[in-house]
């Protein structure tokens, strides 16, 4: 891994031009070995912020949703096209998503769950890929009666807890910096860390830790249990979260940097693909052509 250094205001300096941001193209189709797992971690698609009085405020933009359908269909088209008929039957897929609704410092809220809605579009694309490639719809595990044909909601994948758990800190930040860009920049840089800690609010490092726990629950509990009961499966876990949660985790556990210092933009509906071997000894991803190992996904935190 290349060295990552920093300059003032917590922004990243990169004289070699190594790309740190997370894009759609980083969701690369991968095929695990039999008994292995692929984890796709994706940012929610773009939602509608144009009219706060509209019932569609906070919902996915229709064109963004359709792009996700195409994206996930193309992903699994490429997977199935590179498998034998026998191995196609070994593919199992499950989609998880943050169940968070939209909440903003300004007080504007929406009941729409943009990550969950993104997951529904991901599943739509997967179903199309399954039909096109002669697989069975029950290979998408969300099609079971238990999940009601929907993404599985995971509270650990939500974006921010401070709106519900620490409203006094949100008010403090809003009163001091306003509800817009400066609020978010200084929250991400943890400029008010002392006040935040006094008020018991979650910050970038705590978000990274929460995300690690959520992701290792998927890779160490769900995946291991499924493989134990279904040997030789090619398991795909597709998890949708948000910029505010994925970025700190990538900083801390992929780039091995301080989650409050490095700036890692994420493209809407962008993400990464992580491949985990059948022996649970290696987890790795490729971003901008650079390979990163992620050992934290192999050990469930206490």
Image (cartoon, rainbow, N blue to C red):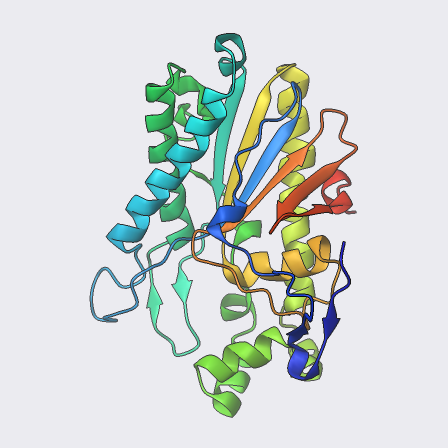
Residue for point 61% across, 15% down: 230
Extreme residue in the top direction: 86
Residue for point 71% across, 42% down: 297
Image-based side of 120 in relation to 192, left or right? left
Residue for point 38% across, 76% down: 107
As drawn, 195 above or below 161: below
Q: Quadrant of residue 126?
A: top left
**Would residue 98 be seen by someone viewing this image from the given angle?**
no
Image-based side of 190 in relation to 67, left or right? right
**Would residue 130 be seen by someone viewing this image from the given angle?**
yes
Extreme residue in the left direction: 54
Q: Position of residue 238 (x, y in %)?
A: 51, 38
As drawn, 76 above or below 45: above
Query: What count of labels does the image hold?
Result: 0
Extreme residue in the bottom direction: 176
Q: Position of residue 48 (x, y in %)?
A: 29, 62
Nearer to us in this view, 173 or 126 = 126
Q: Quadrant of residue 17?
A: bottom right
As drawn, 99 above or below 84: below
Q: Position of residue 235 (x, y in %)?
A: 58, 26
Q: Position of residue 247 (x, y in %)?
A: 59, 60
Nearer to us in this view, 171 or 259 = 259
As drawn, 78 above or below 256: above
Quarter that holds the N terminus: bottom right
């Amino acid at each position: 891994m290349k060295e990552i250094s920093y300059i003032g205001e917590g922004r990243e300096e990169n004289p070699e031009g190594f790309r740190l941001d997370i894009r759609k193209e980083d969701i690369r189709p991968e095929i695990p070995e039999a008994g292995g797992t692929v984890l796709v971690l994706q940012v929610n698609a773009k939602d509608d912020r144009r009219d706060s009085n509209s019932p569609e405020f906070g919902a996915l933009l229709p064109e963004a949703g359709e792009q996700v359908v195409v994206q996930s269909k193309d992903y699994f088209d490429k997977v199935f096209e590179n498998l034998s008929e026998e191995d196609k039957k070994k593919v199992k897929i499950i989609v998880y998503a943050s169940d968070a609704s939209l909440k903003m410092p300004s007080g504007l809220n929406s009941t729409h769950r943009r990550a969950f809605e993104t997951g529904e579009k991901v599943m739509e694309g997967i179903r199309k890929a399954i039909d096109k490639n002669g697989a069975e719809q029950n290979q998408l595990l969300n099609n079971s009666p238990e999940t009601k044909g929907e993404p599985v909601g995971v509270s650990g994948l939500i974006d921010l807890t401070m709106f519900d758990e620490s409203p006094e800190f949100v008010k403090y930040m809003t009163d001091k910096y306003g509800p817009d860009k400066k609020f978010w920049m200084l929250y991400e840089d943890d400029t008010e860390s002392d006040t935040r800690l006094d008020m018991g609010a979650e910050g970038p490092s705590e978000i990274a830790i929460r995300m690690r726990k959520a992701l290792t629950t998927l890779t160490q509990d769900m995946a291991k249990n499924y493989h134990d009961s279904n040997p030789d499966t090619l398991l795909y876990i597709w998890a949708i979260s948000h910029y505010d949660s994925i970025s700190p985790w990538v900083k801390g556990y992929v780039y091995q940097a301080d989650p409050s210092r490095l700036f890692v933009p994420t493209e809407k509906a962008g993400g990464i693909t992580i491949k985990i071997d059948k022996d649970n000894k290696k987890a790795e991803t490729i971003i901008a052509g650079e390979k990163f190992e992620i050992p934290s996904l192999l050990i469930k935190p206490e």
